[in-house]
Image: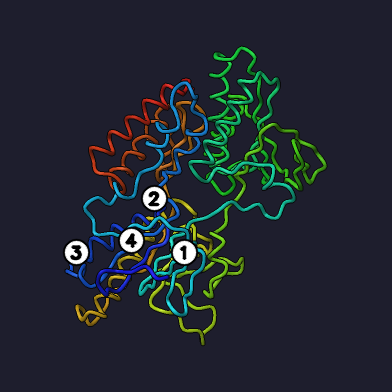
């Protein structure tokens, strides 16, 4: 059945409440109000969860002792209810899972049989773990993509330590930023657990296929992070690829066998599976490709799509016209893409409503280099902002300031943002040892 509306309005539907989806909803809601179009257009945000997950905190959620914070405490600092985020905004929130998209007739099909028509669509469905068809990897590893994933990692490690198991082997597949952050924090957390459980004895290894961790990052950053990881006792297995995984062991292409008690996979992501089924133009690796105005195009010229469709964030691939390389799948890029897509969507609406005769479309221009912060265990991080590289405790402070800036500008009302940030800071500071 179709989801009924009180009035016949045109639907603007955003699928996905990640960084890009949230930013797009704010931008479009603001402009609908500015042009007095709220009576003619319904802005709808649909996601399988009724909250937004602040993914940069997941590595900390996965390594916070149960004695310091329970599940509800952690959920309150890593997930934010959509109703709270959009309080006072004219945005309809749907907690629903998309099962199918009919881009020809303009219908969104949800699990359970409900159907929602759209006139304008923003695809911000995010990404999922990519296991690269490695036999046994998905079955024998844990991902780190959601709040529940983080809890599973924490509970499994805690359970093994609490039971008194000796020589616990924790292996992380993938030496990108997520794998590095998680490895450093797990190692620091294990040092703390040694004080609580006298028999705690565990090792942490990173398996990375490239010659170094953080492939593609600035070499100075790679050197600083590698040095820090080795200093705190994380072992780096470089130039090694996982060929297959069996219970409690990973077989590498070199023939080496790495035993594990906990295997965490952070070695790659791909756009949401639903995106691959859509009749949209795709790049050579099969991901939906958009260009400057963030609009999605049909896979063949003779195919007519319904309405206007935009894509952003991890759901799509945008090639930087200057470098020829895909834009990194990071929050800063998704937010900027969302602002461009929202602006152009509203220009289309203004044209349709007779509010402009000449739309002022924008094109997304990727930054030459996005700033980034990489925490590496305890109160230690490496930050790069332009040419400036900051490491140690000061880098960790910069990371905290970036987090509160995001919450204040993009998600929560100021007072609530400060409360959430301070609560998280209190828990994580107590949980960390000084690096």
Q: Nearer the viewer, residue 261 or 48?
A: 48
Residue at figure coordinates x 40%, y 26% from the top left = 427
- Is residue 208 found left or right of 432 in the rendered image? right
Q: Is residue 426 above or below residue 332?
A: above
Query: Split into 4 quadrants, where in the image is the N terminus?
Result: bottom left
Judging by the rendered image, the residue that carries numbered circle 3 is 33
Within 10 angstroms of label 2, few (less than 14), some, or many (20 or more) residues? some
* SS under mark 4: helix
**Disc on the earlier residue, 3 or 4:** 3
Q: Are marks 3 and 4 in contact (CB under 8 Å)?
A: no
- Is residue 246 found left or right of 42 in the rendered image? right
Within 10 angstroms of label 3, few (less than 14), some, or many (20 or more) residues? few
**Tag of residue 50:** 2
**Disc on the earlier residue, 3 or 2:** 3
Within 10 angstroms of label 4, few (less than 14), some, or many (20 or more) residues? many
x, y (%) of residue 347?
28, 73
* SS under mark 3: helix
Q: Nearer the viewer, residue 141 or 402?
A: 141
């Amino acid at each position: 059945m179709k989801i009924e509306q009180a009035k016949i309005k045109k639907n603007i539907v955003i699928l996905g409440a990640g960084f890009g989806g949230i930013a797009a909803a704010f931008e479009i809601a603001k402009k609908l109000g500015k042009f007095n179009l709220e009576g003619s257009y319904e802005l709808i945000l649909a996601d399988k969860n009724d909250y937004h997950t602040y993914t940069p905190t997941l590595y900390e959620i996965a390594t916070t002792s149960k004695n310091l914070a329970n599940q509800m405490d952690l959920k309150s600092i890593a997930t934010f209810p959509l109703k709270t985020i959009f309080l006072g905004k004219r945005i309809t929130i749907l907690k629903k899972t998309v099962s199918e998209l009919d881009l020809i007739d303009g219908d969104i099909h949800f699990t359970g049989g409900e159907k929602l028509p759209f006139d304008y669509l923003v695809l911000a469905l995010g990404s999922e773990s990519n296991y690269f068809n490695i036999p046994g990897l998905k079955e024998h590893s844990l991902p780190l993509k959601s709040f529940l994933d983080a809890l599973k990692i924490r509970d499994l490690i805690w359970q093994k330590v609490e039971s008194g198991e000796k020589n616990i082997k924790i292996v992380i597949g993938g030496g990108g930023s997520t794998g590095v952050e998680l490895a450093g924090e797990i190692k620091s957390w294990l040092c703390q657990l040694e004080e609580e459980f006298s028999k705690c004895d565990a090792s942490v290894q990173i398996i990375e296929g490239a010659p170094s961790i953080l492939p593609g990052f600035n070499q100075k950053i790679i050197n600083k992070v590698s040095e820090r990881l080795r200093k705190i006792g994380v072992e780096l297995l470089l130039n090694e690829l996982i060929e297959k995984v069996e219970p409690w062991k990973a077989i590498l292409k070199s023939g080496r066998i790495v035993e594990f008690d906990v295997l965490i996979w952070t070695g790659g992501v791909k756009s949401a599976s639903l995106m691959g089924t859509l009749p949209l133009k795709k790049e050579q690796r099969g991901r939906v490709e958009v260009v400057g105005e963030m609009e999605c195009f049909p896979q063949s010229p003779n195919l007519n799509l319904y309405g206007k469709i935009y894509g952003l964030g991890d759901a799509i691939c945008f090639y930087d016209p200057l470098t020829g390389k895909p834009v990194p799948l990071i929050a800063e890029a998704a937010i900027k893409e969302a602002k461009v897509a929202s602006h152009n969507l509203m220009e289309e609406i203004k044209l349709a409503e007779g509010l402009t005769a000449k739309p002022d479309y924008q094109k997304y221009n990727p930054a030459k280099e996005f700033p980034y912060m990489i925490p590496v265990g305890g109160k230690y991080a490496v930050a790069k902002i332009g040419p400036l590289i900051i490491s140690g405790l000061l880098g960790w402070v910069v990371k905290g300031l970036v987090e509160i800036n995001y919450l204040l500008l993009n998600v929560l009302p100021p007072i609530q943002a400060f409360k959430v940030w301070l609560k998280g800071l209190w828990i994580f500071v107590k949980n960390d040892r000084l690096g």
